[in-house]
Amino acid sequence: MADRVEKAARSVFERYDLDGDGLVTAEEYRQVVAELEGGEITESEARGLIDSLDTDGDRRMSFDEFWAAMNR
C-alpha cells in the first residue's frame, strides 16, 4: 500500500518536473499551475511554495523534499 502511495506521489511530482531533471523550480511550478488550473500565480507565490518545501536551500524541490512534506 505504501509503495502505491509513493508511486502516485512520484507521478504527481514528475508532472511538475517539466525538464525531467528531478527537481521542480518555481517557474516549472508556475507553468503547471497555469496549465492545470487555467489561472496564473505570480513568480513570488510560486517561489514561496518551493522555498517552503526546500530543505537544502537550493531553491528547487526534489522528490525527497516533496515526499517529506506529504508525510508531515
Image: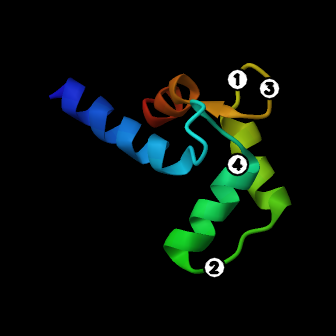
Which residue is at a point 56% across and 43% down the rendered structure image?
Answer: 17
Q: Secondary structure at mark 3?
A: loop
Viewer-side label of 4, 2 = 2
Q: Residue furthest top?
A: 56
Q: Which residue is mark 4?
A: 49
Quarter of the image where one finds residue 21: top right
The spot of residue 32 in percent (x, y) is: 58, 61
57 horizontally vs 30: left or right: right
For residue 39, which numbered disc appears in the image?
2
Query: What residue type is disc 4 on?
Result: Leu
Q: From what the image shows, is residue 48 above or below residue 43?
A: above
Which residue is at a point 67% across and 52% down the rendered structure image?
Answer: 28
Q: From what the image shows, is residue 64 above or below residue 24?
A: above
Query: What whole-number distance in Å separates the C-alpha atoms at marks 2 and 1?
Result: 28 Å
Query: What residue type is disc 1 on?
Result: Thr
Q: Residues within 10 Å of mark 4 (few under 14, many from 20)?
A: some
Query: What residue type is disc 2 on?
Result: Gly
Please say which color scheme the image uses.
rainbow
Labels 2 and 1 touching (C-beta < 8 A) = no
Query: What residue type is disc 3 on?
Result: Asp
The spot of residue 49 in percent (x, y) is: 70, 48
Q: Which residue is mark 3?
A: 58
The spot of residue 51 in percent (x, y) is: 76, 39
Task: Say which label, 4 or 2, has the lower sequence index.
Answer: 2
Q: Which residue is mark 1?
A: 55
Task: Say which label, 4 or 3, has the lower sequence index.
Answer: 4
Of 33 and 72, the residue lying toward us: 33
